[in-house]
Amino acid sequence: MNEERKSPVTLIIGLILLAYALILRSQNESLTPTGLVAVAEYLKTGKTIGTQISVGLWSGIIISLVGIWNLAVPAMTSKFDKLVRAPMAGIGMIMILAYVTRYYMEPIFKIWGKQAQPMLGFDMASVFGLNYILLGILLGIVWVNTIGIPGWMQAGVKTARLAMKVGVITLGAMYSITELKYLGGLSIVMVATFVMGTSLFVLWLGKLAQAERPLIGVLSAGLGVCGVSAAVAAAPVVKARGVDMAYSIGMLLLVGVVGLFVFPPVAKMVGMNELQFGAWAGTGILNSAQVAAAALIFDPNTIETLKVAEIFNITRILFLPFIVIVLAVWFAKGEEEAEKGKVSIGKVLIDKFPLFVLGFLIMFAFSSTGIFTPKGMELHGKHFYKFKIDEKKEVRTRDLKKISAFLETGAVTDPKVKAALGKLVADRQITSAEQTDLVLKAQDFTKEKDLKAAFKEADKLVQAKPATMEMMREYMMWFFAFGLIGLGMQITWQTLRQAGGKAAMIGVVAGITKATLSFFVCWLLIKGSI
């Protein structure tokens, strides 16, 4: 029996989460805010207290029970032990870090950003996207490269990718049929162009640089489709060696990390909207986790950008079989020793194709049946709506004055949009599902943030959010927060240094070309909104 397994660390972490939730609950029941509740009120996170308590209670109880189990039965020999018991300490530690970043670090940076604005001339937290997603990734990177990952945390950190996949699967429930049709059609055109174009461009660059064919093939799949997953899927087809994979993974990770930090501030500087940035991130950033991270850094308060980005990302993943087949043909033609039928392309695709994509599609299918929405709630267009015309939900007078003045400028050229805005001003509220889509479309005719906010507020007043969907959304964000802290803990300087030589040259040139071209296409040619 291994005495090292008797470590109380799992139990301690579980008790910390449980104690935090119980203290918060007791203070929340007080008539006047005290302690942690007072801090939450100051940081403007008071609305999240209920979620903090429920997540802390359930996770604290489960992790504490596993901690007691670990002390009572220290030997871990079964698969269940390795899958469930071993990761719990690391999972609990990452959850604590998620609490710190989401409910404390992000609001503190928001306060600092506004306080420093008069001196800097801009809101530092807003411009640099210093929200809990970015801060969590940075915290993970700093942690792994300074403290390191102790043995008791390693199994938990490895669950980060699973958490990200569960988050993407849950996201499938957030789509409507109309929305998916629109975004899906747009994404197929964009993705088909850039996936095939990038893959062929990498093959040409590799030939130009006289790089070895296995390395070129792996980079072509990784840079063209979806990063490391695509590289792994292509590896057996192009007979990639360990060194090829090491250089490729290092390069793909480096390109993805740079994109993760560069895309959001660039998009904010040029005024991209949710649709434009989601399309750009879903096309130009390689790894699925990094796509989600960039979308959440750009827009941490809603999931609209995330939804667009993930549709583009999943569309891109669906192109993986075609790229693997193309690479198989390319490699077989170029290698005299390649034997026909030696590598089963079908088996490679079945073994390596990301199953979470199927999970996403299944959740979308369930969502389309209305299973997540209460009876009487209508699924219309891009949103869930429930109109209550008999209830007055009037737009603020100052917003109506802005919209009225905007109408008088003649900037709105679409007669339907113009009529919808005129009716909004006259009625002081939106009165139909069709009208709300037209009011949102009015954002395309202005660059003024105040006007865009007024249109969104008018739309918001007639939205009724299903409780099930809201609960799923909240826990989905927890999966992403957890997964992205774990993702940061897997980014070491040693891994990034592996991106050297010809792999670095090919990756940098192809990555910059893809990111730049897709940026201009999304910024200049995509005019719609969501």
Image: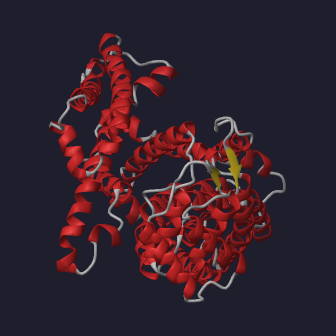
Give whichever of 45, 388 is nearer the camera.
Answer: 388
Q: Which image quarter: residue 96?
A: top left
Q: Residue at x 44, y 64 (%)?
A: 396
Corner quadrant of residue 442: bottom right
Left or right position of 477 against 238: left
In the image as oriented, which residue stretches furthest toward the top?
A: 72
Q: Residue at x 33, y 32 (%)?
A: 53
Q: Looking at the image, which residue is at 42% across and 62% down?
A: 297
Q: Quadrant of the C terminus?
A: bottom right
- Please give left or right for residue 336 compared with residue 464 in the image: right
Q: Visible in this render: residue 499?
A: no
Which of the two residues, 448 or 97, is positioned nearer the viewer here? 448
Task: Decide which of 6, 436 is in the foreground and name it.
Answer: 436
The quarter in which the N terminus is drawn is top left
Is 127 above or below relative to 294?
below
Judge whether 118 appears above or below 95 on screen: below
- Colour treatment of the image: secondary structure
Q: Nearer the viewer, residue 50 or 324?
A: 50
Expressed as whole percent of the image width and height from the top left, the position of residue 507 reads: 53, 73
Residue 7, image x, y percentages: 25, 22
Residue 362 position in % (x across, y down)? 71, 41
How many numbered marks appear? 0
Residue 59 lies, in percent from the top left, at 37, 28
Q: In the current view of this chain or complex, which residue is farthest to the right?
A: 340
Look at the image and tell me whether residue 199 can be seen. Answer: yes
